[in-house]
Image (spheres, rainbow, N blue to C red):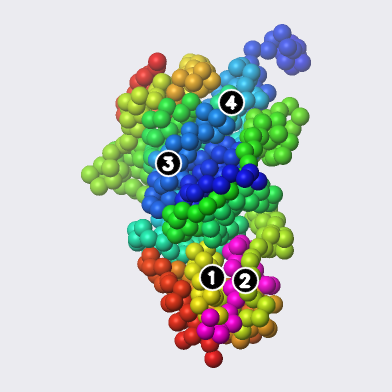
Amino acid sequence: MSEEISLMKGNEAIAHAAIRFGVDGYFGYPITPQSEVIETLMEEAPWKTTGMVVLQAESELAAINMVYGGAACGKYVMTSSSSPGVSLKQEGISYMAGAELPGLIVNVQRGGPGLGTIQPSQADYFQTVKGGGHGDYRLITLAPASVQEMADFVALGFELSFKYRNPAMILSDGVIGQMMEKVRLPEHRRRRTDAEIREQCPWATLGKTPDRKPNIITSLELDSEVMEKNNERFQAKYRLIEANEVRYEEVQCDDADYLLVAFGSAARICMKTIELARAEGIRVGLLRPITLWPFPTKALAARAGKVKAMLTVELNAGQMVEDVRLAVNGAVPVQHYGRMGGIIPTPEGVLEALKEKVVR
Amino acid sequence: MDIQTIKSPENLVYTKPALLNDNYMHYCPGCSHGVVHKVIAEVIEEMGLQEKAIGIAPVGCAVFAYNYIDIDWQEAAHGRAPALATAAKRLLPDRLVFTYQGDGDLAAIGTAETIHAANRGENIAIIFINNGIYGMTGGQMAPTTLSNMKTSTCPEGRNVQTMGNPLKILDLLALLDGVCLATRTSVHTAAAVKKTHRLVRKAFENSMAGKGTSIIEVVSTCNSGWKMTPAAANDWMVEHMFSEYPIGDLKNI
């Protein structure tokens, strides 16, 4: 890591980290509150330095399909958008999962449904972790809670995505995308050569060489027997990801009587709530899922025996709470507190909800 | 003269291109797709681009194009082939990137992707099969279905008052500055096949030279969907399709 520290927005950090990571292509369409990603890339003009392609597509649909086309060539390709645009991308995400293509999608969430609001939200949790597109698939989902993590998760997203040949998403929100914080950007890495890509991605459509059969990237298989086998292969891969790639952070959990469970910006708010609660003698901790899928089910189950109750805090009507309840399987009461439509909960509001719904 | 003498190399006047493999084609007898596949395979071979070619297959009858020509392929979602091709060509500028699309794929669900790829002047070749019908799904109305032509979703014939007019999308594409070649051809006679071969070669040369987007509309038959014999379908195409979709260059820079 370099010692260079910058002050920037989360969206800008994504763009800078992408260039430095050696991303080959970015394809996007403007939408608030994430347009700084493509604006920063256009400003930085990485095609003059690293050779990275940056293209403003005609729609989110085209952008995700460009990601499909680039990923099929074994390239590091990504797109970013916000909730309504990410709905449009679901087609391409399902096809990428079906064709086992890696690639990175960033969702800087805003309030919905529909055109909704441009203010922050976490209401796309279900869409992301339960499969917003058609078919049985899973999306590796990283939830950054700081500008630093926005930068760091570009590399992590690509690493996991290529390791398992599965699309990955950074599920952020308007708070993390728009707020400015200190960030230590990653070191510059050079982009991979075609020879390196051929080595790392023998499946990539880089042009057929005489030593191999044609590479065909497709999600189509009309023979149901084979299609079921394909699905079994996907499911086995998902179980492997669940076994190996769960990431979470625990804050002041050791002596906690009550546990807050929150991700992204909601987790940041909960950090302050912990301070306020502990000042009043209420021993509260936080479990922050970093991967929303795979979900930290075991970590939550382990905590269930040690706390009196849990409260999920989300910028939605109660989505992750369902996964927390499944994880603890009735061992401990789990309540939800959330604000919707772009309203950001306050630390005091969370404390009040904690006292009202959980503290006995 | 025995058969082996007839088949001797010095008597060889025609052969299947090596890139066209021996897989049984799923296309109906009489369909234009097989001929167009052969032409593409011939041109890739002739230009020595076997190791540089990346084909993008559509959704529709040609969804399995990748089973027949031995090059690298990507299978696109319905209508999105030009978006895939855009990324592949931008990321690999020295490769030959082409899409192969039918009328439903290119002129209905993929209209936006087609128009915008062409408007950006992406250095790709688009092979567009226009047979005026959805073949794969069983013969429904296409954007290019002729006025009064019967299909399973316009059993009384396409009523242009309520179902829209046959879409001359090549005319729209020819207007775009990013397009260097917009031409209509067919493959119903030996002469037409030869001409199509020359046009496909021009399109692929344009792609490699970075001249912009080339679109070749192959006015085609779908004898199964049209419910005709292959020979009758060819006659019907000449009589009805060619007046709506005239053969020839709209643009050839």
Tags 2 and 4 touching, CB below 8 Å: no
Is tag 3's residue or tag 1's residue first in the polypeptide sequence?
Answer: 3
Q: Chain of mark 3?
A: A
Helix, strand or loop status at disc 3: helix
In this view, the mark in front (3 or 2): 2
Residue A4, by quadrant, is: top right
In this view, the mark in front (4 or 1): 1
For label 4, the residue is: B95
For label 3, the residue is: A39
Is tag 3's residue or tag 2's residue first in the polypeptide sequence?
Answer: 3
Tags 4 and 3 touching, CB below 8 Å: no
What residue sits 48% from the left and 57% below the top?
A176
| Residue A55, horizontal then vertical, whole percent | 46, 36
Dot 4, how many residues are within 10 Å of its Cα: few (below 14), some (14-19), or many (20+)?
many
Q: Is residue B227 magenta?
A: no
Q: Going by the image, does A13 lie left or right of B143?
A: right
Q: Is residue B143 visible?
A: yes
- In magenta, the rendered stretch is A279-299
From the viewer's perspective, is residue A226 above or below residue B150?
A: below
Q: Chain of mark 2?
A: A
For label 1, the residue is: A271
